[in-house]
Every structure is written in C-alpha cells, then in structure tokens.
Amino acid sequence: MIDLTVEKPITMSAAAKHCGVTPWTAYQWVKQGLETIQLGKKKYTSLEALNRFGQRGNEEATEIMPTKYDAQAVREFQDKHGVHQGAGRNAGA
C-alpha cells in the first residue's frame, strides 16, 4: 500500500515514462497488482510501488521458470508462455 507520509505520488503517465512503457501498459500493471491511489479524478502510484511491483514480478518469474537445465521443462515452459528463443533467427538453418 502506498504510504503518502513517505512516498511521493506520481501520475500513471509519469510512471509509464519512468519505465519506458506506454501509459496503457502502466494501467495494465494496475490490473496485475501495481499499487495505486486515487486523488481527485487521477490515479497515482509511486516509485516505491513500482519497485515493489517489479520485485514481485521477478519472484513470480523465478518460481515458474525452470531453475536447472531440463530440456523437457524448458520446452513445456516455452509452450505454456509462448516463448521460443531464436524463433525467426536462423530458423531452419
């Protein structure tokens, strides 16, 4: 939760710019758990909230990603998440 006594609120547009993404992407992060507050008609977050959100994302990625090389587990992970390294690069070479 954003603590206004120690965290400075920033607009969602500013948060998006800070992270190098579009405002639409930043609003999608809200649906995924980015902490926000409503002040008047605008939604705000904070740099600290962005950091917490990023940390949670990294922890979740670590939990679902195979930690040791297991070719079958890697293929299953890639199929489940639509990730295929090298697709399109030297494909079929």
Image (cartoon, rainbow, N blue to C red):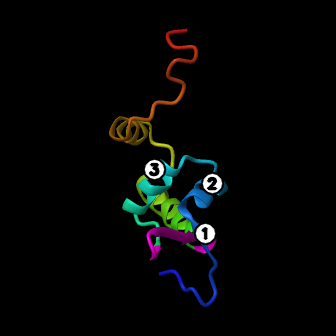
Check disc 3 and report the residue beneath it: 66
> Is-magenta flag for residue 42?
yes
Q: Which residue is mark 1?
A: 10
Residue in the picture at 64% in, 48% down? 20
Give the x, y percent position of residue 48: 61, 74
The residue sitting at 54% across, 46% down in the picture is 22
Instruction: Provide residue 67's location: percent of width, then percent of height.
Output: 50, 53
- Indicate the amino acid at tag 2: Cys
Q: Quadrant of residue 13?
A: bottom right
Q: Amino acid at mark 3?
A: Pro
Question: Is label 2 or label 1 in front?
Answer: 1
In-image side of 26 versus 78 (left or right): right
Q: Quadrant of residue 51?
A: bottom right
Q: Find residue 93 and report its horizontal and vertical position in percent.
A: 55, 9
Disc number for residue 19: 2
Q: Residue at horizontal 46%, vertical 30%?
A: 84
Residue 91 placed where, x, y %?
A: 51, 14
Q: Amino acid at mark 1?
A: Ile
Q: Secondary structure at mark 3?
A: loop
